[in-house]
Image (tube, coloured by chain):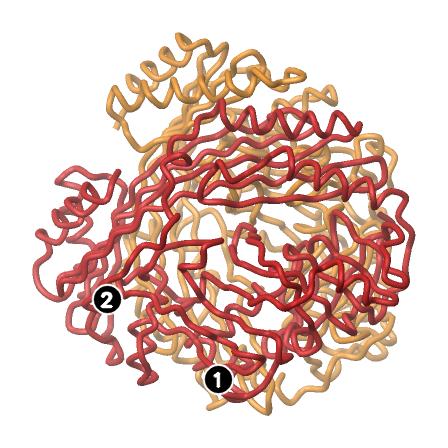
Chain colours: A red, B orange
Amino acid sequence: MDSEQRERLAQRVLERAAGGETEVMVAWSSSELTRFTHNAVHQNVADADVVVKVRSIVEKRTGVASTNLLDDASLDAVVRRASEIARLAPQDAGQPELPRGGAAKTPEGAFMSTTAAATPEQRAQMADAIFRVAEHHGYWCAGFVTTSCGGVTIANSLGARASFDGTDSGVNVKMNAADSTGFGEGYDTDVRGLDAHEIASRSAAKAKDSAAPRSVEPGEWTVILEPAAFGELVSYLADHFSAQSVEEGSSFLCDGMDKRYFSEGVTLSDDYAHPLNPGMPFDFEGQPTQRLALVENGIARAFVTDSYYAARMKRENTGHALPAPNAYGPQATHLVIGHGSKPINELIAETKRGLLVTRFWYIRTVDQKKAIVTGMTRDGTFLIENGEITGGVRNLRFNQSIIEALARCELGNALHRTGGYSYSLVAPAAKIEGFRFSSGTDF
Amino acid sequence: MSFDALAARALDTASQAGASYADIRFEIARTERIEVRNGVLATLSDSTSRGYGMRALVDGAWGFAASSDLSDAGLDRTAARAAGIARAGASIARRRLGEAPPAAYVDTFKTPLARDPQDVPLGDRVALLLEAEKALHTSPSITVGRAWIDLWSTEKHFYSTIGSKIAQSIRQSGSGIQALAVGDGDLQRRTFPGDIGLYKSGGWEVIEQAQLRENAERIAEEAVALLRAPQCPSGTFDIILGGSQMSLQMHESCGHPAELDRVMGWEANFSGVSFLEIGQLNKLQYGSDLVTIVIDNTIPEGLATVGYDDEGTKSGVSDVIRDGLLVGYEMSNDTARTIGRRSNGCVRAQSWEFVPMIRMCNLNLLPGKTPFEHLFDDVDDGIYMESNRSWSIDDHRLNFQFGCEIGWEVKNGKRGRMLKNPTYGGVTPQFWNSCDAVADERSWVPWGTPNCGKGEPMQTGRTAQCAAPARFRAVRVGVGYGG
């Protein structure tokens, strides 16, 4: 469903609204994923859907209803239901007027027709290239090849109108050897930018180089985190940059803005227009999203808002609203961690004794205020001795404050896009001193 | 609405497109959520989604396609797409993975309801939450109060080319409250019931059982008291885990590793593999002889209770751990066949848009014989912990670490002072073999987990781990804070 069709649909909904303010979101998505294990496809899926969501605000009372039924009667019903719910809700004196929107330019490369037109056969051929790398090494591989496209239109009764179309594609490969594993990933809005053979080869090299892993003692280590590991770690800090977290007292930023928290080399921004991860230039209220420097040279500078928290905290609306209804507050969803000056090989060469971590797994927050998280290493952890990688090590569990880690870190010079089911961001490698591991494993 | 004609058309189209087997699952799902946050309705929403997912088997490879387009053209396109995707997978297959299910059923199932939530006026539902949330604000230290209700209604209609025709009406409900206290540079939270609320199959009776209003003040006062409570010590202690924490302990260290798709490497790149390898079946002493864990997808209140799973397999009861020994898995048709067994009906999809996959469903630790209060009797120096705050486990499901919202010292058989930030860790089989008491059926609760993540694309599953509090000896405590 293209933007014109979505905008016509949104208009049909707005015309049905009677009284109060009305916001309509029309979201269309089509995604395909080919998943494999043991060098064979075991899940091969595709889905498509259009959702219409209506937010009705009547005398500062809010109701939300949604449907994927697009006939006239269903659209009548969803508008009526949102309005009914709103009239039953208690008044929220802090509810502001809906944003009136504004110009928002879609970044170059956000939508690529090559990705939108990708076929199951294309994904199968990419998977087959990965299988061949695994077979060449005598390994088995597991992972996926995915392509997707979608569009969002926001319209409201105060005149806001915004539409965005985007595509995405990704390859994820875990290589499994006798006593070791390796990992590689790639993401691109243009599926032609993904080299499945290269990603699989990188993953296989990790498995090969970490064979016959030895045990090392838990404790404080110098670590070099590759972008996948560092990016996932920092993703657990994103919520601290939400106005809601600041207001409720759960963010470390409550200790003060314009204050140094991290090493001087650490810069963190929210940038929907970064060329490695271009995305939607407005939020789910239709407000243009600002490209924000959250941390500059280790000093906290900003947090993100939406219309509700901007009004409540008497700040500017930065355009970071999630879809209504939203109990999580505004969120920074396009994090970019700025790069440093040294290649990862130089960071390794300067390390007398340390660990190189490919990837983390199952990070969870242990202490929200202190930003202590726990998690495991996975799919390629290596010992560094006298500036050289000397072999694989068995996996370790860490318990570490992200704030303290960023205060003792030096960043690599190359940026990569990395992602998981709940985040997609741009990160360099990082060297962190005194990273605390608490226990180990036998694998 | 009858889906018979639509199903017949789609299944015929898939067959004509080369599928040796196909099934189609129509779903109409209604989701209602109400959430009050600091006296304001943060969420009051009502969503309806209708669509269907089709599986097609071509040359031993599966294809899945889903759509909300119920027109003839939409059905034809989706059926052909499922078969086409299967054929693309078959073209690079090194071996056949799939076969048609071994049995067909024609049947209906309906979740028993004591009171339909739709009979409770929306204004009354909101009022219940406003009152419960207001009661959380016992102190200026409470910066956030939350209260919520989730109501889910799903109509499923499953058809297959081998003759299955199954109609199910599934109702699930849940609610909870949470208080966040901030002070002296610290933040503490308490949640009730359990760590995520009380979620079960059923209607408004599930919301009433939670007794939110009755427990709000106590929960808030505990959150504030935690700000001043001493830090949980580090070291090796006997621990007693409350029922909801036992539920999550089972979920992570038994439910997930016993998924046979995970054992076979189907989740290897994402949520990992499992130490419960097939060669360990009927050999591994997973836990002490007090530990018996069964899958029972028929119990009336279990959040995952259905008549048939999303492959059309009838629900039943089967063992995973019997007297501590590994004896079974959660299985689908294809995975069960590889170990010479039949599926035990553990396949679910999040919604019509998603491919069905193995889920732990209702996983029950059978109650023991010890009254809850006697779990403390012969503990000289231990910690009692309740309500999960943090959870993590490695990708083999061995090395785990959990944190709870609240703990208490146990000295010489008595519960003592409150402790904050309790954490503990261990290795799964050693931990379960250290279990020397499970509380009796009076404290056994079918705890539901409404947000279990698994698969790619990620699916959110509704599972249950029915459990009572239990005691474990010589466990490493304080691991999250340097211990």
Mark seen at residue A372: none
Which residue is identified by label 2?
Answer: A62
Q: Chain of mark 1?
A: B
Q: Position of residue A251 (x, y in %)?
A: 52, 79
Q: Position of residue B51 (x, y in %)?
A: 33, 33
Q: Amino acid at mark 2?
A: Thr
The residue carrying mark 1 is B142
Relative placement, left or right, of B255 versus A253 is: right
User: Closest to the observer: B410 or B144?
Assistant: B144
Query: A286 or A279, which is in the foreground?
Result: A279
Q: Chain of mark 2?
A: A
Depicted A369 relative to depicted A18: above or below: below
Quadrant of the image occupied by residue A119: top left
Q: Amino acid at mark 1?
A: Ile
Local packing at callout 1 (Cα closer than 10 Å; few below 14, some 14-19, many 20+) is many
The count of marks equals 2
Image depth: mark 2 or mark 1 in front: 2
Q: Is residue B220 visible?
A: no
Alpha-carbon span between mark 2 and mark 1: 25 Å
Secondary structure state at the residue bearing disc 1? strand
Q: Position of residue A346 (x, y in %)?
A: 76, 62
Using the image as rendered, state which of residue A352 and residue A183 is in the foreground: A352
At horizontal 37% and vertical 37% (from top left) the residue drawn is: A30
